[in-house]
Amino acid sequence: QVQLVESGGGLVQAGGSLRLSCAASNSISSITNMGWYRQAPGKTRDLVATMTSGGNTNYADSLKGRFTISRDNAKNTVYLQMNSLKPEDTAVYYCNVEVRLPLTLKGRYWGQGTQVTVSS
């Protein structure tokens, strides 16, 4: 099974920054897309940002310029740098990866989620 370990969430004041990390298990040899989604209470889980193995990125329009996604393919890790945080960024943030190899693990996986709370 694929394990995704998320870290970096917490409580921060408005205007502050946080960096989330998500490391996938070492048994994976190839990951296509890696990304972050978030879900606020009573709302749907929405796209934050994704990144392909080649470095192409896709962001939610409202987050462009404040959030930056990056990844370390050698470590099977994806990061999310969040700057100028606002109270409306408060949500549970979920890591998502699409495994290509090995074929026995091919599929899409979610992390357990990490809470981000931004106080006003």
Image (tube, rainbow, N blue to C red):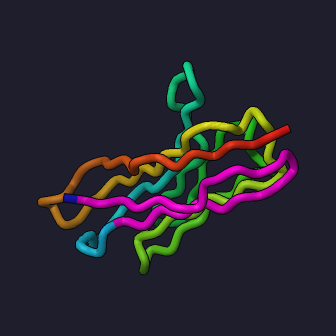
**At 55% from the left edge and 40% from the top edge, which residue is drawn?**
92
Quadrant in the picture for the N terminus: bottom left
Say if 83 sits above or below 44 in the image: below
When asked about the image quadrant of residue 5, the answer is bottom left
Location of the C terminus (image quadrant): top right
State the count of labels: 0
- Residue depicted at 54% across the width and 50% down the height: 50
- Image coordinates for residue 115, horizontal then vertical, percent: 57, 45
On the image, which quarter does residue 28 sit in? bottom left
Q: Is residue 93 left or right of residue 14?
A: left
Return the residue found at the far top. 42
Queried whether the magenta region covers residue 21, the answer comes back as yes
Q: Nearer the viewer, residue 11 or 42?
A: 11
Q: Position of residue 34 (x, y in %)?
A: 46, 56
Q: Residue at x 18, y 66 (%)?
A: 102
Q: Could you tell me what secondary structure mostly forms the magenta stretch?
A: strand
Q: Taking 24 as reference, is 38 above or below it?
A: above
Q: Which residues are magenta?
A: 2-24
Q: In the image, is 110 to the left or to the right of 67? A: left
Position in image of residue 84 (x %, y %): 84, 50
Name, please, the residue furthest toward the left.
Answer: 104
Splitting the image into 4 quarters, where does residue 62 fall? top right
Given residues 10 and 63, the one toward you in this image is: 10
Q: Nearer the viewer, residue 48 or 6?
A: 6
Q: In the rendered view, tell whether residue 7 sits above or below residue 84.
A: below
100 in the magenta segment: no
Residue beneath the point at 53% across and 56% down: 51
Q: Is residue 2 left or right of residue 104?
A: right
Where in the figure is residue 12, as x and y percent of width and height?
76, 51
